[in-house]
Structures are given as structure tokens and as C-alpha cells.
Image: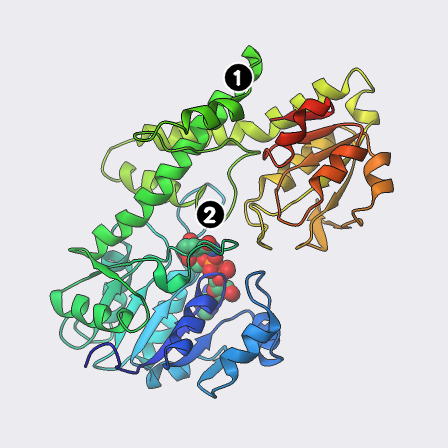
Amino acid sequence: MGKDMIYTVGIVGLGYVGLPLARLFLEKGHTVYGIDLDERKIQKLTKRQSYLSDFSNTDVRRMFSKGRFFVGSSYEVISHVDVMILCVPTPLDEVAKPDLRFVREAMTAALPYLRIGQLVILESSTYPGTTEEELLPLIESIGLKVGKDISLVYSPERIDPGQSVYELQEIPKILGGVTPSCTHFGKRVYETIFNRVVVVSSPRAAEMTKLLENSQRFVNISFMNELMMLCDKMNIDLWEVIASASTKPYGFTPYYPGPGIGGHCIPVDPLYLSWKAKTFDMDLEFIELANKINEQIPEFVVRKIEKHLSSVKPLHDSSILVIGVTYKKDVNDLRESRALEIIKRLKDSGAKVNFYDPFIEQIELDGTNVKRISLTRRYVQQHDCTLILTDHSGIPYEEIVNNAPLVFDTRNAAGKFKNRGNVILL
Ligand SMILES: NC(=O)c1ccc[n+]([C@@H]2O[C@H](COP(=O)([O-])OP(=O)(O)OC[C@H]3O[C@@H](n4cnc5c(N)ncnc54)[C@H](O)[C@@H]3O)[C@@H](O)[C@H]2O)c1
């Protein structure tokens, strides 16, 4: 027993979380069965092709190279695994409430194949209580007793797609089991792949840990966005202010404004927590306020562009070249991206909008597919404004500043050129 133990692992959901986790298990010698209902993903993997910006086709080929990686959409393989890990989406529904459909469906589909001695781990971000209130009753409904026949653990994923500073295995892994024996099993498994496993007292504490991390970012970034709107009125450069405050060697953590918080996590997870708080007769006012401010930012961006273009031409006669449409740099993820909302608002105002994003070939706007244009000097010169919404690496920002009539930069990607007069920072 211990660090060199080898397991057969079932990973349900092969997205931004599940696929890197599968790779880590494979690198450490385990066997992995990956299950995903998205046939396109399974087909791509079968053809040894990647669909994630952090993975090359070579990375995918390497995952299969030892003959220990199997992918498909059938849950039958769960009967062969020691550990099943759920990495399915946890979005909001149409009235911004937690939508646990995917978690429930995945667990229900696995039930016929569960057997005594297995470990079930939930990795999807969710409100405190989900593991014990949703998964435990499902598992026990088929006559297996959690803590005796089968182990159940919550362990939040802390991966940060698009960044290369930390290897997945270097990010400490939090986990909390329903019983001490569940925790012990989870720890044994994760110690074979992560450098450090941090045990907390319960699944609820582990679930709350993830929501604390993401809510802290949500509240602080929203606060920066609120200050950004004030600094706009007061003609103060907030980016300069944050840089100067960051020289304080203690007690100040920099967060940055932007075009509105996007992605599947930061604008979503805190609302899971505030929904849960309401069931305890509490309003989480920080989160609700952060959400309200976040909702205001796309319109603020559009109006500020309109103001700066007004000396040249009205917004409805203008052409705008958007750089970057994904919710953050260096990923191919469009979920909850505020760029799409800003583009829609610009178009609704009558502006002609084109976009370039190295990771995205086309976007869908009001049911129509819009293809990206090439990032050429001529296009940059021809558009009245180049609008930087995502600061992807590898974009020639200086050349853009040298050629664009106006650059509106929501990410401070071109901030060092602001003295040239044609760069406006958010
Ligand atoms: N993306 C991130 O940066 C990140 C970071 C930390 C935590 N998380 C959390 O991890 C979870 C997964 O996020 P993600 O970004 O990997 O989502 P994703 O959409 O990239 O991947 C989820 C996958 O699950 C599949 N799926 C859905 N229902 C299924 C089912 N019943 N059976 C099998 N497969 C199913 C989908 O087809 C999809 O491929 C979410 O709860 C998210 O909040 C995400």
C-alpha cells in the first residue's frame, strides 16, 4: 500500500478538468477508463486528436501510448474500476440557480455498475452539501452503505487552464470523505498522483473550500471593476494605482479589472453558494453585489468605446476589430465569455464588428455563425477601433498600437504604449 499502489480509474467527463486528470493518472502508471457522452470528444480522442488548448495531438497520442487509456460513452466499464471520479459540468440554470443535472445523471448512469470496495469522488465545483445530499442517497438507494461497502469523497479541482506556472500535480489536492475510511481511501489514491494532499474534516468543508477560493476572486475582481467605473469618472488610471499599491510588501493582493468575469467557474460557483445560503435564510450580500456589478460591465465597455469614438464618428457608423473572445487568455473556452455579450451589444448599437482570436475560428451570434478574420496590418488600419477583450499571448500588441486609429484595451495588454495617444485603457 502507499505511493506506488496502482489503480484502475474511471473518469466521467473528459473536459478541461477530466482530461488533464486522466493524463496525470496515466503518467503515474494507472489505468484510466474515460467516459464522456459528447461523441465528438470521444471521436477526437479515438483519432488521437486534441480538443483542449492546453493539449497537443502529441499529448493525446502519449496518453494512449502505453495501452492503459480507454475512452467511450458506455458506463459498463465502471464495473472494472477501483475509483470513479465525476468531472461533469455544474452550470446555472435559466434562472441562475444551481443545475446539478449532469452530476445526478452521471451518478445515476453509474449505479448499475457500482460494486463493493469502490471509491466514488466528486470533483465538480458545487455548493456545500452536494456530495452528502445528492450522491450519498443515490448510492445507498441500491443497497450499498457509504463508509462500509463503498467510499465517497469530495475533492475540488483547482486546475487553471491556460497557465503553465504550476503543473497539475504541484497544486495541493483538498479532499474530505463522508467517513474517516472514505477519506483514507481518497488520500491513498490521490497521494499516488499529487505531491501534496490536504485532508479536511468533511465533504462539506472541501466543497466550501473551493467556493471560498472562487468567491474571493469574484468579489475582489468585481470590486476592481466598481473602482474602475469610479476612476473613469475621476480620470484616474486604476492600472497605475494597482501597480503602485502592489509595491506594499504585505497585506495587499492585486486583482485587476476587465471586461466582465467569464468562464465556467468564477461567475458561476459563487452563485451556487449564495443559492445554498438562502436555504439557511441568509443573503450573501457580497456575492450578490459582485454579481450585480459584473452584469454592468459589458454595457459600460460599450458606452466608453462610444464616448471615445464620438469625436471621429458615431458608434453605429463605426467598425470595430475585437481581439480575443474567450473568457481568459490562452484557452479555447467561450463559456460565459463577456466578449460575446460585448460584441452583441456593439452590433445591436449598429457597429460593424469583426473578431480575431487565435483559439477560436468562429462564434455564434444570434443563431448566425461568424468567422474570425485574419489579424493583418491592413485590417487593423481599416477598423476605427481595435478592442482588446482577451490578452492572449503571441498577439503583436505593439504593431496593433502602431497601426490602429484607436485601441481600446480592457486588459492592459497594450498599456505600456498608452503614451502614444491612441490607446485607451478600460
Ligand atoms: N474549467 C476549469 O477551469 C475548472 C476548474 C476547476 C473546477 N472546474 C469544475 O469542474 C467541473 C467540470 O468542468 P469542465 O470545465 O471540465 O467542464 P467541461 O464541459 O469541459 O467537461 C465536462 C464534460 O462532461 C461531459 N458530460 C456531461 N454529462 C456527462 C455524463 N452524464 N456522463 C459523461 N460525461 C458527461 C461533457 O460532455 C463534457 O465533456 C465543473 O464543475 C467545473 O466547475 C472547472
The correct choice, above or below, for 423 with respect to 40 in the image is: above
Residue 251, how many percent across, how many down?
A: 30, 29
* Extreme residue toward the top, this view: 234
State the mark number for residue 93. 2
- Give how far across and how far down residue 282 sits, in percent: 25, 32
Q: Could you say which disc has been placed on residue 205 in the image?
A: none
Given the image, on which type of amino acid does mark 1 rest?
A: Cys
- For image coordinates 13% across by 70% down, the residue present is 181
Q: Is residue 258 above or below residue 190?
A: above
Q: Position of residue 37 (x, y in %)?
A: 51, 71
Quadrant showing the C terminus: top right
**What residue is rendered at 60% in x and 24% in y?**
300
Front one among 44 and 221? 221
- Mark 2 is surrounded, within 10 Å at the Cα level, by few (under 14), some (14 to 19) or many (20 or more) other residues, namely few
Residue 215's quadrant in the figure?
top left
User: From where the camera sits, is residue 90 visible?
Assistant: no
Q: Which residue is mark 1?
A: 231
The alpha-carbon separation of the residues under discs 2 and 1 comes to 34 Å
Seen at 37% across and 43% down, the residue is: 214
Q: Is residue 132 above or below residue 388?
A: below
